[in-house]
Amino acid sequence: MIYGPDTKKQIQGSAQGIAHVTRMLKSLHADPLTPYLGKLSCPTLLLVGEKDPMGPRASELIREALPEGVAKLETLPGRGHWLHVEAPDDVLRAIDAWREPAA
């Protein structure tokens, strides 16, 4: 569950869209992307919420699978999985700071 078993929140969206996401997740289980990460060479920003139910460790594993020096991992304190919904301003600040590092 996205929000946990005791939530009163409901997922809104089209049945077709949710079906597409479900198929995508199933395909990732069968053929995970992690083994391919070592081939990436572009700079990468990984953002994760401190309270993400999947845990920041999942993002650390992604960073570790990327080539040395390619990725920056930033953990947003007090935030969960849906950073773009929970803290859009924090996400934008992190992206802007990453794109324009201090001289």
Image: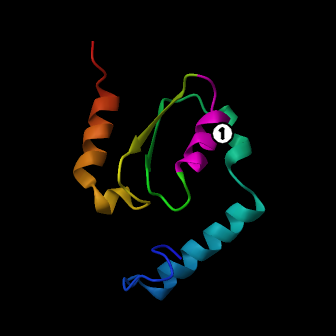
| Residue 77 appears left or right of 36 | left
Looking at the rendered structure, the kind of residue marked 1 is Leu
| Residue 1 appears left or right of 91 | right
Q: Nearer the viewer, residue 72 or 56?
A: 56
Q: Where is residue 80 in the image (x, y as percent from the top left)?
A: 41, 59
Seen at 31% across and 22% down, the residue is 101
83 up-or-down from 69: above or below:
below
Q: Where is residue 23 in the image (x, y as percent from the top left)?
A: 64, 74
Q: Mark 1 points at which residue?
A: 37
Residue at the far top in the pictured view: 103
Question: Magenta region, mostly helix, strand or loop?
Answer: helix
Segment tinted magenta in the rendering: 56-68
- Badge 1 element: helix
Q: Position of residue 70 (x, y in %)?
A: 54, 27
Seen at 28% across and 25% down, the residue is 100
Magenta stretch holds residue 95: no
Q: Which of 82 and 78 is in front in this view?
A: 78
Residue at the far right in the pictured view: 30
Seen at 67% across and 36% down, the residue is 65
Seen at 64% across and 34% down, the residue is 64
Q: Where is residue 13 in the image (x, y as percent from the top left)?
A: 40, 82
52 up-or-down from 18: above or below:
above
Q: Quadrant of residue 36?
A: top right
Q: Residues within 10 Å of mark 1 (few under 14, many from 20)?
A: some
Q: Nearer the viewer, residue 26 or 63?
A: 63
Image color mode? rainbow
| Residue 34 appears left or right of 87 | right
